[in-house]
Amino acid sequence: MRFLVRERSSLVREKSFLVRGRPKPPPPVSPGDVLAEADGLHVRLGVREVLHGVDVTARAGEVLALVGPNGAGKSTLLGALAADLRPSAGVVRVHGRPATQWSAPELALRRAVLPQSAALSFPFAVEEVVRMGRAPWASAPEDDDAAVAQAMAATEVTEFAARPFSALSGGERARVALARVLAQRAPLLLLDEPTAALDLRHQELVLRMCRDRARAGDAVVVVLHDLGLAAAYAHRVAILRAGRVAADGPPSAVFTGDLLSDVYRQPVEVFPHPRTGAVLVTPERDA
């Protein structure tokens, strides 16, 4: 009996410590607030310097697309903005403070990160994977349930909630991984090639979701290879070339045939859509 009382007392103390030790959620943000910023950023991976003096900002209410050829430094920049990679020089700020000044639990409440690939060693069900996104929060079960259900509905994975993650196709895994990020409900989303494994419909769905999150006040930074998607859905585009920002601004301003042809070393045509006037980007091809 005394053992059970001690065990109960220990559990109560542990729960109390966890509640007291959880960081406070970030305050609400306003449109235009800078939620992530790279200032004079240099990042070295091994013996190679991947980023060379990069300046970029992610603002609440905007979708920022990072584009550029393979090896330009897009994923490295995203990892640095997420505070997953330490700069060799310069600084990354998250919610106005140097990223190194935030603890991991504090960062988890402020930014959610989707890596290029998602791998799990254990046979978790889809819903269990999505629910992992709620780990940073000390919320009521009904709040977690609502966040998970909304994230799964937004990515259209509800129908296979009970299936093992390992049994999914590549595109289905990508959507489940994105649902986990959405369930985290952080005001800064950092997404590395979220459309790479998706079909046409789900590419559009994901980028519309990015726009919706920005419209709701979040900041979204997304690495894209499809320049057409970037032109259609991003408010701003940062074009990277060899670890430097070649241009940063609205797609209509920075997507020019000369610049893109130079950056990608491939002749590119940029022209207005015949019906909407939106920017279209396509490689030059023989008839």
Image (tube, rainbow, N blue to C red):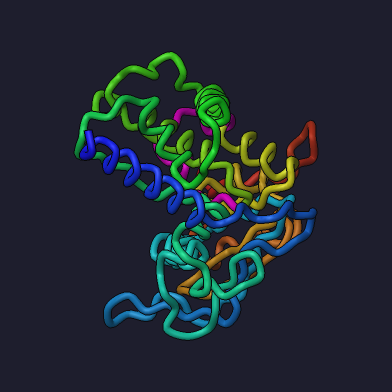
Q: Vertical placement of 206 versus 217: above or below?
A: above
Q: Residue at x 51, y 44 (%)?
A: 137
The number of callouts visible is 0
Residue 265 seen in render: no
What segment carries the magenta color?
188-205
Which quadrant is the N terminus positioned in? top left
Please, which residue is most extreme toward the front here? 2
- Between 77 and 189, the one lying in front of the other is 189
Left or right for 221, reference 279: left
- Between 7 and 18, the one lying in front of the other is 7
Q: Position of residue 287 (x, y in %)?
A: 53, 39
Please, which residue is most extreme toward the bottom here? 89
Q: Position of residue 173 (x, y in %)?
A: 36, 32
- Between 163 and 200, the one lying in front of the other is 163
Q: Give residue 45's quadrant in the image.
A: bottom left
Indicate yes or no whether the magenta region holds residue 233: no
Q: Residue at x 47, y 37 (%)?
A: 178
Q: Residue at x 47, y 51 (%)?
A: 113
Q: Position of residue 29 (x, y in %)?
A: 74, 54
Left or right for 128, reference 180: left
Residue 183 seen in render: yes
Q: Residue at x 22, y 29 (%)?
A: 123
Left or right for 173, reference 157: left
Q: Vertical placement of 85 versus 157: above or below?
A: below
Q: Vertical placement of 244 versus 60: above or below?
A: below
Left or right for 123, reference 36: left
Q: Position of residue 248 (x, y in %)?
A: 67, 66
